[in-house]
Image (cartoon, rainbow, N blue to C red):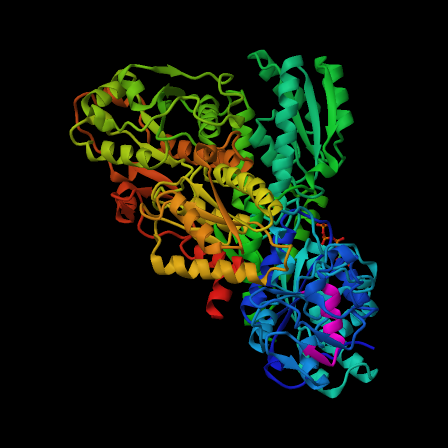
């Protein structure tokens, strides 16, 4: 009735089978996770399966066998190639002209696999059923189809099978060969079946809620299906419910196997072979509601959709001086509401885990909005999480909030419920990168698993992919809901990560006009704010947060316009609370920025500090910003006015600031790259067989190119770090040839090659493109596109805006802690005690945020190449090559 669990004999017997499913609510990035699991599984020598429709598919299993492909309409059939019709028992391809590729059309493939005589027309002939049978790949759910090249022999078939190139698309009820998937939920997939999935929203393999999986009977059926297909490794991408189900299945597994055996459903060999089930969880959820991980797959894309909507609403709200109450998703988790509040500069937010401070929240909200209006703000934005509550657990609903604003403040108020627009759409860059990195780790966790290890969940902490015991994460997640139910909001907040808590603090500081948080008069500072280097997304958001911090604490924010040149021109002014209100959403640099260092006129720069009475300095910018702080620190002995605390907040699209894993602006830039590449890829695919060489900025750092390659599924990437050599180029051409030869004819995709502009001054983008064009011959064509300054991005991404707020808050706290009021006047001309600890850079390092001294930064800096000596992402280039297929095809010779 069903396929054999494992093929008889041969090495395949020990080949692991890894299946992946998506379950619960869909989220953007799930496809990237599935793609990563499938490709990494194949790259690691395993067989990959997808389970359609979540747990439901696993419970149902396959009720039908793969059907032969329907014969295509005659126009699609390339008759000279095909020879006999699909009913023939003997298939010959001898009519094929030599040197021309042989395409096995779906119909011909089906016929060939049924035939007992196959003549490939190139001297390779299979004359007996025994010889033909292995070709049909019988144990697989799908036989191979696709393309055989001229001169193809058994080795090539094996190679194809090894790469799983079967060209089966599982998105619809038919696969790419037109075979029905009806009644088929457990499907073996190959490398190309997940091609192009990075940019698709939702989940292409389907998801569902499955009541029967909650019962033992359902799970028994699921276990039976897994064993039937020989699958003992399962990656589950879903929310806490789905992952709880996964762990339950694993916990019960031995008893389920026993029961299946006793019922005679599995034999002795199966009982022994499948005594253990390996499970790994990937968290797909737009709410970001899972504990023990910073970010779930899909949450950031949802935040993108929310911010796009609120940004649009903000302009109309401002035009008409209206109030808007916006409901966003989040039943037990206020992450979306909180981060959207910061990213869009909202006035008030309601989140489940931290209700308004007082029972009379209506007055609290009205007072705050009134204070904003009183300083001249024309719009009011209130964000309400779906699960928002007051301190007595009474739900806070948008319509009631509106009523209050109308009745008490007389504001023209509208309600907007964003609903399902938040779920979907094209995944943002990070929701392609994160699930890819996590999917790779998930396969590793499955391969490492033993009966003794717990089931793991793959998560992320700042910039580190981590694995945590799945049950612990689920328990902590559920504990948040329980704490809220018990009105223990402090406990609920304590289960959220530190980022969440800092974001809440940043939001409260930025929206409050109260003076209750002011420090005593003799502790108040004049804090200089300056942008240095090229503009980058998030610079303005960081400055807004800094200004708001100053107003909240009683300090004076002093803007230095146009960098150090501006300081020399005395282009300096204090910034008001309202002036920076809309800066979260603005790209570029509102203060104005350039590459001049303080060394343009160090004495006068120092004099400028003195003239404007700066007690502390925040420098936002890229490599030059770091260099500026370094120069000032090195000149402290000569110029006492530099003996004030200064901190550099890295912001540059190139992400080439040493030591820190991320700079502000790099996410905006990656998103700009992904958007551009999606469009280019579409054009390249429309012309079927075109390679696009896309040139990126990035100076001597290949970060944008490398991460861009991972996010767009580029097949090749060139960076300044690795350079380009003739031998590599030769391999790359060979890879492209092989790749295009393996495509089903007429179904070739456009492919991307990403090249950082400074990868090589000999093999320029133009030269590369010409080489590919020349070598591609009739297989593929090549074109180039340069992204140039578009990579600075327009509107900053939500990640850059919120990261800016959080890091800026930390910077200001640092300056407040180390600053002395009236520093310039009190120490005029005198050298006073200062420590190297007070000239620092704030940096994201793995799972931590640190303050690094200039010495610490210098140690890891290549000043000549203007980048770090070691980069955390250096291995990612190799991963991009694995995911793009280069590694596999070149390694296989
Ligand atoms: P979302 O966060 O989008 O709600 P979720 O994974 O938490 O995603 P659920 O509806 O809770 O969504 O769970 C999805 C499926 O996982 C359920 O339909 C059910 O099949 C399975 N499941 C959930 N909880 C359990 C459980 N305790 N035991 C067994 N299976 C479960």
Quarter residue 35 falls in = bottom right
The magenta segment: 104-118
- Closest to the observer, 193 or 534: 193
Is residue 188 shown to the viewer in this render? no
Question: Left or right: where does residue 134 sit relative to residue 541?
Answer: right
Q: Residue, x 15% and y 29% (percent of image)?
A: 638
Please identify the dominant SS of the magenta region: helix
Q: Residue, x 35% and y 48% (percent of image)?
A: 763
Quarter residue 190 falls in = bottom right
Magenta segment: does it hold 110?
Answer: yes
Magenta segment: does it hold 504?
Answer: no
Q: Position of residue 639 (x, y in %)?
A: 18, 27
Q: Is residue 367 above or below residue 705?
A: above
Quarter residue 15 falls in = bottom right
Q: Is residue 590 above or below residue 30?
A: above
Which of the image's four quarters has the N terminus?
bottom right
Q: Position of residue 167 (x, y in %)?
A: 66, 62
- Closest to the observer, 594 or 580: 594
Question: Left or right: where does residue 552 sit relative to residue 656?
Answer: right
């Amino acid at each position: 009735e069903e396929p054999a669990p494992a093929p008889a004999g041969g090495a395949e017997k020990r080949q692991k089978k890894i299946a992946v499913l998506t379950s619960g609510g869909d989220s953007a990035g799930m496809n990237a996770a599935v793609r990563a699991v499938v490709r990494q599984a194949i790259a690691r020598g395993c067989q990959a399966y997808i389970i359609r429709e979540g747990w439901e598919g696993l419970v149902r299993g396959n009720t039908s066998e793969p059907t032969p492909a329907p014969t295509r309409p005659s126009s699609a059939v390339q008759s000279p190639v095909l020879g006999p019709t699909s009913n023939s028992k003997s298939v010959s391809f001898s009519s094929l002209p030599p040197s021309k590729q042989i395409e096995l059309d779906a119909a011909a493939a089906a016929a060939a696999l049924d035939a007992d005589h196959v003549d490939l027309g190139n001297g390779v002939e299979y004359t007996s059923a025994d010889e033909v049978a292995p070709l049909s790949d019988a144990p697989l759910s799908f036989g191979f189809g696709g393309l055989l090249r001229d001169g193809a022999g058994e080795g090539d078939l094996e190679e194809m099978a090894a790469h799983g190139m079967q060209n089966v698309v599982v998105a619809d009820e038919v696969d790419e060969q037109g075979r029905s998937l009806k009644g088929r939920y457990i499907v073996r997939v190959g490398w190309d079946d997940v091609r192009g999935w990075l940019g698709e929203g939702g989940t292409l393999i389907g998801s569902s809620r499955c009541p029967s999986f909650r019962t033992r009977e359902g799970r028994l059926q699921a276990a039976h299906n897994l064993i039937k297909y020989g699958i003992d490794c399962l990656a589950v991408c879903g929310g806490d419910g789905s992952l709880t189900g996964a762990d339950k299945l694993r916990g019960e597994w031995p008893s389920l196997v026993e029961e299946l055996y006793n019922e005679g459903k599995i034999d002795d060999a199966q009982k022994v072979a499948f005594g253990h089930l390996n499970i790994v969880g990937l968290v797909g959820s737009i709410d970001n509601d899972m504990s023990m991980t910073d970010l779930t797959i899909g949450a950031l894309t949802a935040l993108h959709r929310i911010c796009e909507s609120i940004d649009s609403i903000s302009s109309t709200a401002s035009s008409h001086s209206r109030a808007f109450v916006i409901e966003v998703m989040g039943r037990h988790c206020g992450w979306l509401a909180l981060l959207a509040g910061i990213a869009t500069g909202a006035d008030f937010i309601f989140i489940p885990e931290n209700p308004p401070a007082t029972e009379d929240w209506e007055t609290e909200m009205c007072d705050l909005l009134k204070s904003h209006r009183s300083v001249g703000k024309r719009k009011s934005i209130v964000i309400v999480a779906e699960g928002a509550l007051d301190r007595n657990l009474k739900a806070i609903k948008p319509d009631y909030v509106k009523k209050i604003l109308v009745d008490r403040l007389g504001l023209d108020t509208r309600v907007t419920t964003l609903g399902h627009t938040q779920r979907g759409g094209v995944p943002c860059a990070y929701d392609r990168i994160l699930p890819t990195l996590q999917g790779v780790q998930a396969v590793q966790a499955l391969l490492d698993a033993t009966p003794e290890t717990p089931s793991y969940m793959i998560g992320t902490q700042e910039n580190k992919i981590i694995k945590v015991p799945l049950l612990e994460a689920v328990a902590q997640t559920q504990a948040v809901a329980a704490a809220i139910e018990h009105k223990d909001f402090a406990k609920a907040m304590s289960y959220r990560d530190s980022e969440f808590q800092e974001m809440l603090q940043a939001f409260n500081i930025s929206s409050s006009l109260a003076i209750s948080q002011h420090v005593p008069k003799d502790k108040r500072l004049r804090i200089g704010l300056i942008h240095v280097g090229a503009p980058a997304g998030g610079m303005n958001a960081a400055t807004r947060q800094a200004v708001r911090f100053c107003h909240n604490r009683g300090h004076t924010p002093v803007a230095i316009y146009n960098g150090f040149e501006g300081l020399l021109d005395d282009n300096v002014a204090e910034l008001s609370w309202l002036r920076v209100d809309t800066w979260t959403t603005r790209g570029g640099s509102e203060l104005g920025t350039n590459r001049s260092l303080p060394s343009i006129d160090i004495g006068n720069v120092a004099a400028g500090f003195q003239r404007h009475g700066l007690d502390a300095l925040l420098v936002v910018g890229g490599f030059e910003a770091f260099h500026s702080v370094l120069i000032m620190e090195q000149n402290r002995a000569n110029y006492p006015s530099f003996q004030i605390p200064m901190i550099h907040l890295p912001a540059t699209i190139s992400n080439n600031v040493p030591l820190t894993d991320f700079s502000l602006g790099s996410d905006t830039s990656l998103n700009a790259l992904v958007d551009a590449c999606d469009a280019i890829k579409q054009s390249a695919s429309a012309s079927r067989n075109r390679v696009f060489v896309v040139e990126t900025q990035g100076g001597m750092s290949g970060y944008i190119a490398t991460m861009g390659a991972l996010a767009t599924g580029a097949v090749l990437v060139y960076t300044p770090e690795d350079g380009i050599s003739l031998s590599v180029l030769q391999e790359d051409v060979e890879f492209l040839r092989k790749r295009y030869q393996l495509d089903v004819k007429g179904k070739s995709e456009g492919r991307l090659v990403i090249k950082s502009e400074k990868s090589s001054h000999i093999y320029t983008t133009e030269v590369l493109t010409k080489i590919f064009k020349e070598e591609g011959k009739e297989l593929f064509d090549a074109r180039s596109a340069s992204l140039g300054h578009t990579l600075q991005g327009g509107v900053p991404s939500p990640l850059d805006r919120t990261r800016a707020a959080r890091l800026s808050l930390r910077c200001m706290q640092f300056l407040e802690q180390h600053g002395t009021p009236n520093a310039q006047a009190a120490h005029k001309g005198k050298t006073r005690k200062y420590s190297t600890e007070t000239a620092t850079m704030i940096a994201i390092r793995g799972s931590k945020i640190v303050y690094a001294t200039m010495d610490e930064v210098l140690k890891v800096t290549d000043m000549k190449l203007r980048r770090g000596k070691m980069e955390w992402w250096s291995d990612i280039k190799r991963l991009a090559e694995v995911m793009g297929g280069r590694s596999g095809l070149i390694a296989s010779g």
